Amino acid sequence: MIVAEQKPLKDIQRMLKGKKKVLTVGCGTCVSVCFAGGKKESSAMAATLRTAAAAEGQELEVEEVTVQRQCVQEFVAPLEENIEEYDAVLSMACGVGVQTLAEKYMDTPILPGLDTNFMGQPTEPGIWEERCVGCGNCVLEYTGGLCPITRCPKQLQNGPCGGSEGGMCEVDPSIPCIWSKIWTILDRQGIADSLMDIQPPKDWSTSRGGSMRRVVVGDDLRQQAAREAGERATTVKVAPPQSPMKPAVTSQAPSEAVELDDTWHRACSLADLPEGKLNRVSVAGIDVIVTNLGDCIRAFPPTCPHLAEPLVDSGLLKDGLLTCTKHLWQWDLRSGEMKGAAERPVALYEAMVNGDDVMVKVEQEITYDYDEEDDFDEDDFFGAD
């Protein structure tokens, strides 16, 4: 995950000098986990800025909002409705999120509220350590899964230096010598003798330098190596979803009203369902996502069948292909086929257009059974008792 920390308040106040109305935008992913820029932190920053301005006799109106991911343009698109009202936007995301906003909303100053530090992991509650520099040429194959490029201050690739003592680093005695840990892991696996092979100089051509790096995936959101392997790149045919999918008329030509039984319920008007959008509505007291694909209407439960991820937040819909961006599970809503990394089908309610109304057939709520190993516990994540 990307680890960041908040800029000093005085630096943020300097950036906002002369501004009268500011929007703080939190990010609900990486920087939320490291307590730097999530919903709570964004709200706290807004309150702090208001209080500090009032204490200095200044006029400053600060509002706050949090999106699921600032690094994806689709997730920041809703800000477009009123972003012009603000003198500036304070992004509480990593540098990628700041740049996403800056490129999308070029008429409004986008300012960074955080300093982006590194890619890392939590080692203790409230402590994150760097684990990857993104060099583009991973050496973890022969180092027991531990990175000497990141974790050895000298970036040695053929064993430790002569200064480590007692398994601790010569440069910083407060941290373990990573090469000592690498040896321990490979020795336990019975392959420590592989360290006797001399590794060539590191190929830094794939690392940061000269030009912006780019990774290009195919239309099916898979990288070339995965497509060539073929194992997960093949579309999986599945049985029909729990509820049959009945084609609906196009949104441009509402059908004439017909009489329906009491299992059909009005979800919304067709005019309120723009093509290609995911709309979460309550149908007979049950949360349902309805979407207009242009040639048909689809309705389905509001969560991903993988880890109960809210699809309104993490779902992307393009040309009838629904993608849960959390783990790239995909479904063709027209055919019902699983695509991408999907291992379970998305269940569908029957849906149709009746006159000017979008109707959904709800006899009972559709729910998914989640495997116990899929359950996520924040206490476990942070190592709490």
Image: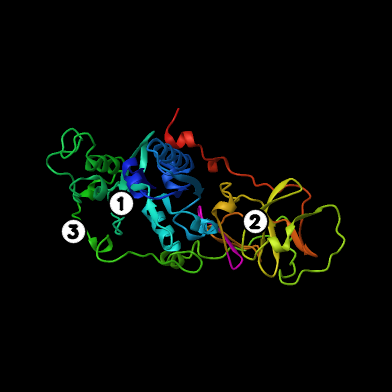
Between discs 1 and 3, the one toward the N terminus: 1
Q: Residues within 10 Å of mark 2 (few under 14, many from 20)?
A: some
The image shows residue 130 at horizontal and vertical percentages of 31, 45
Tell me the magenta residue range: 318-327
Q: Which comes sooner in the sequence, label 3 or label 2?
A: 3
Residue type at tag 2: Asn
In percent of the image, x 75 and y 64: which residue is there? Answer: 246
Residue of label 1: 140
Q: Secondary structure at mark 1?
A: loop
The image shows residue 11 at horizontal and vertical percentages of 31, 45
Per the rendering, the mark at residue 201 is 3
Instruction: Give neighbour class at mark 3: few <14, some 14-19, many 20+ (Cα, 10 Å).
Output: few
Estimate the spatial distance between the alpha carbons at disc 3 and disc 2, rounded to whole Å: 53 Å
Tell me the number on the disc at residue 279. Answer: 2
Label number found at residue 164: none
Residue 145 visible in the shown view:
no
Q: In the image, 135: left or right of 237?
A: left
In this image, 166 relative to 232: left or right?
left
- Give whichever of discs 1 and 2 has the lower sequence position: 1
In-image side of 382 versus 279 (left or right): left
Helix, strand or loop for disc 2: strand
Amino acid type, mark 3: Pro
Q: Point out residue 272 in the picture as x, y percentages from the top left corner.
A: 69, 60
As for residue 321 lying within the magenta part, the answer is yes
Q: Give the amino acid type for the residue marked by disc 1 in the picture.
A: Leu
